[in-house]
Image: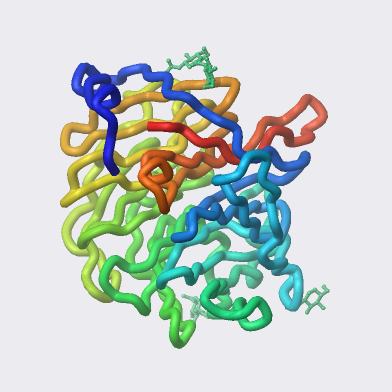
Amino acid sequence: MRFSIATLALWASSAAATQASPPIRNIYTFPPNHFIENIAVRSNSRLLITSMSVPHLYSINPLISAPAADVVHTFASPSNATGISGIAEIAPDVFAVVVADWDLFATRAIPGTLAVWTVDFTKPAAQRVKFVAQIANSTIFNGIARHPTNPRLLLAADSAAGAVWRVDLVTGASSVAFSSPLLAPTETAHLGINGLKAQGSYLYFTNSAQGFLGKVAVDFNGNKVGAIEVLSEAADAGADVVYDDIALDLNNGQGRVWVASHPSYAIGVKLPGANQLVVNNTTKLLNPTACAWGRGSRKQKNTLYVTNGGEFLADFTLVNEGVVAIEL
Ligand SMILES: *[C@@H]1O[C@H](CO)[C@@H](O)[C@H](O)[C@H]1NC(C)=O
Ligand SMILES: *[C@@H]1O[C@H](CO)[C@@H](O)[C@H](O)[C@H]1NC(C)=O
Ligand SMILES: *[C@@H]1O[C@H](CO)[C@@H](O)[C@H](O)[C@H]1NC(C)=O
Ligand SMILES: *[C@@H]1O[C@H](CO)[C@@H](O)[C@H](O)[C@H]1NC(C)=O
């Protein structure tokens, strides 16, 4: 990412956990009860958005005012999928998605329903969507990422088992690549490893339950190499901060990892050093679930799109789910 002089000056003066208030713009608000979970951005700047409460993959054009959320594909048939969790680009304009029949209160898939599909935008609409694998032994793939150097491998964060899975995108074979107590949930919070992104030889991830951002090196087959490193703690950014999914802005491991965080935060963790730039906005950031950099123009590349999970009314209707843009 490139940053303006003003932004650099702001960051140069940041201390342990600095408050900042860059402009935040609404891009799209979904109707009630669409829990918005994840985001990926196409090379043509379109935002691909997933919801765990509906089986539609959405596309939103952030370049126009008042864009619509177009349904790219509905996964309800032939599977019985009720929603989509992770999404990641696995080849130019080809995206993997995780679909399942979700028990939303437990944030787990009904056993046997979790599956990986791909959506290939280089193909005509009728041939775009392809089944890759059923994952019988996992109840949640949360964040997913293509292996940084092995184009056949998709890596997936299993928030329940406390593991990273590998899925062979060609054969559909899947197995646990590694597991660790540092990836596991806790007795009181049921999402362990959550966000997952890959760069260089590292996976960067959050553990929501244990409240930290970490990294771990992997080999060509996705096996863990060396120890898991804790980079920053959510509690150091604020007492109520819960880390969710992440977007990288790193060059050779230096820069910032942006963490969408509940209930009202986007947090830029500077590496090395773990200084946390805290964007706190209770009117625009409503239980942020994920974030991703824009693509295309220079302005897009300096825009962080953040998905809002939404907020519950007293009767448990979920409202104000959507996506906002932070100009950084
Ligand atoms: C939240 O963001 C909006 C839009 O940029 C801004 O008008 C408002 O002042 C922000 N609130 C805080 C507390 O920074
Ligand atoms: C979908 O659900 C129906 C009704 O429970 C069941 O008969 C069918 O086998 C399910 N399909 C898949 C692909 O799981
Ligand atoms: C699921 O896990 C069990 C126990 O580890 C194993 O025996 C079985 O082969 C696994 N099934 C699949 C489809 O991976
Ligand atoms: C974020 O803003 C809210 C509302 O003003 C406030 O209650 C909360 O303490 C702030 N968080 C941090 C970490 O300062």
* Furthest residue toward right: 315
Asked if residue 135 lies left or right of residue 102, the reply is: left
Q: Residue at x 57, y 26 (%)?
A: 284
Horizontal side, residue 95 vs residue 114: left or right: left
- Hey, which quadrant is residue 300 in on the image? top left
Q: Residue at x 42, y 23 (%)?
A: 22
> Vertically, is 4 above or below 34?
above
Quadrant showing the C terminus:
top left
Q: Position of residue 138 (x, y in %)?
A: 53, 66
Left or right, residue 21 beside residue 286: left
**Residue 57 location, x and y as percent?**
65, 60
- Determine the image quadrant of residue 134: bottom right
Q: Say which of 168 and 40 sits in front.
A: 40
> Is 85 placed left or right of 240 in the picture?
right
Residue 11: image quadrant is top left
Give the percent coordinates (x, y) of residue 147. Answer: 33, 68
